[in-house]
Amino acid sequence: LIRCVHGMIYLAVLVAFAACDAPPVPLDDIVIEKTFVPEQCVRAVKVGDYVRYHYNGMFPDGKKFDSSYDRSSTYNVYVGKKQLIEGMDRALVGMCVNERRLVKIPPQLAYGKEGYSDVIPSDAILHFDVLLLDVWNPDDGVQSKTYYTPENCSRKVEVSDYVRYHYNGTLLDGTLFDSSHTRMRTYDTYVGIGWLIAGMDQGLLGMCVGEKRIITMPPSLGYGSNGDGSDIPQQASLVFDVVLLDLHNPKDGVSITNQDIPQPCPRKSVAGDFIRYHYNGSLLDGTFFDSSYSRNRTYDTYVGKGYVIGGMDEGLIGVCIGEKRRIIIPPHLGYGEEGTGTKIPGSAVLVFDIHIIDFHNPSDPVVITTNYKPEVCETLAKKGDFVKYHYNASLMDGSFIDSTYNYGKTYNIVLGANQVVPGMEEGLKEMCVGERRNLVIPPHLGYGERGVDGEVPASAVLVFDIEMIEMEAGLPDGYMFIWNEDVSADLFTEMDADKDLQVLASEFSDYILRQVNEGKGRLAPGFDAYRIIENMFSNQDRNGDGKITEDEFKLKADETTHDEL
């Protein structure tokens, strides 16, 4: 606090007397006033350090004689090596980056009696308002400080690895000069082979995917004495806040981890198999890009034939049904340098967590396993037989499809009549009543590439546990009705109930049903009796007039083109 009273100056702290218009009091040494001190001071200037700072140079009356701001360029110099006036050499020692000091320097520590040209007069006290922006030492190397380490670090960056990372680049005073985040694109490069400035080449070594670190480097390992010509000034220390997102080496192959293999595993996939699997796809840093689960549908493809990216083609070989595994695919076996343009960036390592639902080969037959066979098993199911059986149906992963037990009744079919999928036809053949079997039916013998909407997925392998409950022998191939005894010699007359020399449909139907009921004839089991009789009548009614004459009437033995009588 200074105030003038009656031509005298009173100082609240220092006691001195002088006229109000007298010249400044001489200084014996430099006076330093810290006008701003940053909260953190990670490094203070020492003798021998190189500094970059801004300043305003003034006389005690406030008149400016020089300023680095006017030149739009910091003052860059070594400290303590007599490259500065002695007072400034001493005043800079101990300063922190972003610290601001008001320095008062007596003439004997400045330009003395000689002054400086016509700018600074003799014996001038100089005031400098100094802001320190940068400090480094020729002996400095790269400084790396990790502030986040992921829990799992299975691999660290080595020389010749290819990395993808985000960064914010600042000067030592915090001035931002570049950021990959603003471009919304990672910086992708090889490490340790000269593609980067030397400090970054060193600073990235040893990083884990997901790690975050601050890399600080002196200009000798950055952009040196020239800067970059735009945003990075000469002799500037650089600070990079880096997060590593991806890491691989061109020599990398597919990596298989986190395997969960079911037991038993009777079969493993080979090239040429058709496979159905679920997956979650992510980048190495965990960024999700796709999932079959979100579509509620498996991914279905042939393996080993180039239908999928090379790494997946390789990673799906040798899997078991029900297996879970993680497949890590380097970009040269994935989507390469271009990526997909949207979700998968260029040169990205891919991570697939997969679950194998089923697989088969187009050459696979039905796999039949007999679980139980009764001691007496002589009558075996054949084409034309009417069979009744129970089943439980599921997918290879155990997913339930259907069961006759839920309906409380058997499933009834005629073998060879195309009433079920071919694989079931094959599995029921030569079964006896009471026998139980397990059937594994490939899709080309099941419901094929389309499946059954809402029930059976496309290209799904089916598993049936079946039990034969009843069986009725069918008729000889090509017959829908047979006689159990000799045929009457006067068959037409017996059918012609009203003796009008023609047989109507009702007469024909009544007669055939009577023969069946009396055990003299037999209709093919498993079919609608009235439909069979209707077809038999139509075949005999050769002119289609709704009645059969004696000339039209023929027995099966008399012709080869009809399946009646």
Image: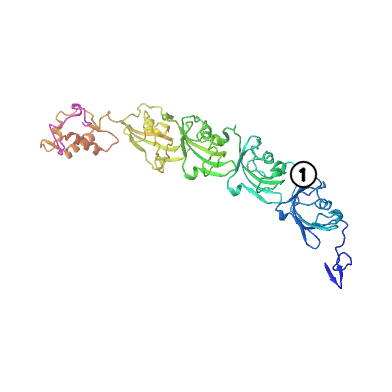
Which image quarter is the C terminus in? top left
Total of numbered circles in the picture? 1
Quadrant of the image occupied by residue 460: top left
What is the image's colouring? rainbow
| Place of residue 421 in the rendered image (x, y in percent of width and height, measured from the top left) | 37, 35
Quadrant of the image occupied by residue 325: top right
| Place of residue 186 in the rendered image (x, y in percent of width and height, measured from the top left) | 59, 44
Residue 411 relative to residue 30: left or right: left
In percent of the image, x 45 and y 40: which residue is there? 400
Q: Amino acid at mark 1?
A: Asn
Which image quarter is the N terminus in? bottom right
Which residue, as the protein is rendered here, is positioned at the far bottom?
6
Quadrant of the image occupied by residue 389: top left
Give the SS element for disc 1.
loop
* Residue 551 within the magenta-colored segment of the rendering: yes
Which residue, as the protein is rendered here, is positioned at the far left?
500
Q: Which residue is mark 1?
A: 137
The answer to whether any part of residue 322 appears in the image is: yes
| Place of residue 271 in the rendered image (x, y in percent of width and height, measured from the top left) | 48, 29
The answer to whether any part of residue 215 appears in the image is: no
Residue 268 relative to residue 432: left or right: right
Above or below, 262 relative to 67: above
* Residue 269 within the magenta-colored segment of the rendering: no
Residue 230 relative to residue 48: left or right: left
What span is colored magenta in the figure? 543-565
Residue 509 relative to residue 387: left or right: left
Q: Specify the principal SS of the magenta part.
A: loop
Density class for disc 1 (Cα within 10 Å; few <14, some 14-19, many ≥20) is some
Relative depth, front residue between 387 and 540? 540
In percent of the image, x 38 and y 27: which residue is there? 377
Above or below, 262 relative to 174: above
| Place of residue 523 in the rendered image (x, y in percent of width and height, measured from the top left) | 25, 34
